[in-house]
Image (spheres, rainbow, N blue to C red):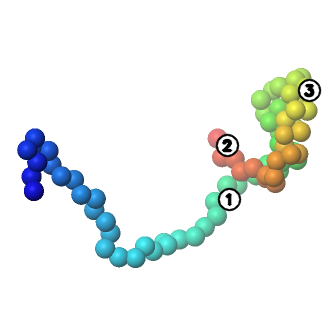
Amino acid sequence: MGSISGEVDHKTKKAGGLASVLALATANPPNVVYQDDFPDYYFRVTNNEHKVHLKEKLKRVCEKSMIKKRHFFLN
């Protein structure tokens, strides 16, 4: 069954077996910042400690989120 316009029919190739889980792991970078300390850490690292109103806003956001700790890769 070819097409008149010369288009090629493309069929999806599927694997011929069951899927396998090769590994289960949790990525834990060495740099962890706990959510309670994150606003102080962030404003200290970015040299913006003078922006107190933004720091308070970020503290409220961090308190209301369900995140306990943040993992960073710092270089």
The quadrant holding residue 18 is: bottom left
* Mark 1: amino acid: Asn
Judge left or right: residue 14 versus residue 25.
left
**Residue 42's x, y, as percent?**
80, 36
Q: State whether residue 58 appears in this view.
A: yes
**Residue 14's x, y, as percent?**
31, 66
Q: Which mark is residue 9?
A: none
Q: State whether residue 44 appears in this view.
A: no
Q: Which mark is residue 52?
A: 3
Task: Determine crowd level at label 1: few under 14, some 14-19, many 20+ residues with C-alpha closer than 10 A.
Answer: few
Q: Earlier in the sequence, mark 3 or mark 2?
A: 3
* Mark 3: amino acid: Val
Task: Determine crowd level at label 2: few under 14, some 14-19, many 20+ residues with C-alpha closer than 10 A.
Answer: few
* Mark 2: amino acid: Leu
Closer-to-camera residue (55/66): 66
Judge left or right: residue 48 versus residue 28.
right
Residue corresponding to mark 1:
28
Report the residue at 89% width, 23% height from top. 50
Q: Which mark is residue 74?
A: 2
Instruction: Quadrant for the C terminus, please.
Output: top right
The quadrant holding residue 62 is: top right
Q: CA distance from mark 2 to mark 1?
A: 13 Å
Quick check: marks 3 and 1 in contact, CB under 8 Å?
Answer: no
Q: Earlier in the sequence, mark 2 or mark 1?
A: 1
**Residue 52's x, y, as percent?**
91, 26
**Vertical arrangement, residue 28 with respect to residue 60, above or below:** below
**Residue 30's x, y, as percent?**
70, 55
